[in-house]
Image: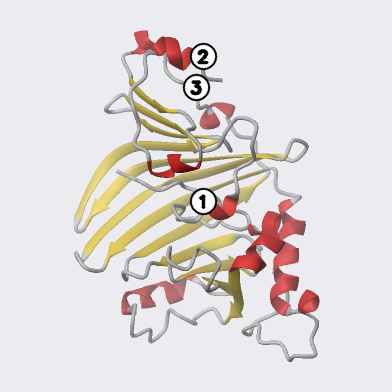
Amino acid sequence: MLHTIIMLCALSVQPDVQTTDQAPAATNAATSPARVFMESLAKTDESINTMTGQVQYTIIQALESDLQKRIGNLYLTTDHENGQRGYAVRFNSLQLDNRLSDIREHYIFDGRWFVERLPDQKQFNKRELVAADEQLDPMELMREAPFWVSLGRNTDRVFESYNIDLLDRTDGLANNPDFPELSFLIETVEDSQQIKLSPKPGSGFEDDWEWVRIWFNSATNLPMLYVKADWSGDLQIVQLFDVKTNTELDPRLFDTTTPPPESGWNSQISPWRGDADTTVNSQTIQYEVIEQTP
């Protein structure tokens, strides 16, 4: 069962930078390589209306020596006029260690509601992550999200909370004593730029995870690999393949409507309960109440 929110890898235009952002003191922070890179993300983000790709999502739990790998498809849609973005992931296969099985797991986030649909079990879980009249802070989602939210839309916010380094593509993958299992990814990041983000002390995020690394294809300027390391030594690895932009997508991919009672689905709804709701469990609500929830 996936317990995290699937979000978009950062979109980017590839700047001509291949080294860690350690600018001299005289260099203005506004023109540092990292800042230039981040600003380029915002520019490209404006041109992306939809994005699709095949996704492989791997969780490696260090202490249990456990490997879980899900394979499926990622979808993104953006309404630039209203500033709204929708995400959807559909997984169709699951590998647990050496066992491979077919699955149907659908996840949707529309900016307000996070939905988990399990068609085989006819289970529908829906959780409101923000009040109807508020905007969700993407930085808060990083406590759960295996994908980094769109960096270009939050440049100043990211610099406030994270150290940002531009690195060579093999950094952290080759000869890594802490994570030797990452070496197999070297051959998947040819012609790419890597960016590394680590929470700043005092940011409030430093206890969530140690670092996030994202690689971007130099030819297409699109995300291709994401690696997130927890302090426990657990790893989340997301690989994107065959990424395409601005293709027509079926709106039903992003539908968060609760199934009607006659459909036979078991629906569990968790409405917004304020800031403390981040740890609340789902509760079953009668359909009459669900109908009143917009």
**Badge 1 or badge 3: first in the primary sequence:** 1
Q: Tag 3: Cα neighbours inside 10 Å, few (<14), some, or many (≥20)?
A: few
* Residue under the point 59% across and 28% down: 251
Q: Decide: is 198 above or below 91.
A: below
Could you tell me if residue 149 is visible in this image?
yes
Front: mark 3 or 2: 2
Q: Identify residue type, mark 1.
A: Leu
> Would you place residue 31 above or below residue 44 in this image?
below
- In front here: 237 or 82? 82
Pointer 3 or 2: first along the chain: 3
Can residue 12 be seen in the rendering of this structure? no
Q: CA distance from mark 3 to mark 2?
A: 12 Å
Q: Earlier in the sequence, mark 1 or mark 2?
A: 1
- Quadrant of the drawing holding the N terminus: top left
Choose between 94 and 157: the one closer to the eye.
157
* Residue receiving disc 3: 257
> Residue 237's image quarter?
bottom left
Which residue lies under the disc numbered 1? 141
Return the residue at label 2: 292
Q: Secondary structure at mark 2?
A: loop
* Mark 3 vs 2: CB contact within 8 A: no
How packed is label 2: few (under 14 Cα within 10 Å), some, or many (20 or more)? Answer: few
Amino acid residing under circle 3: Thr
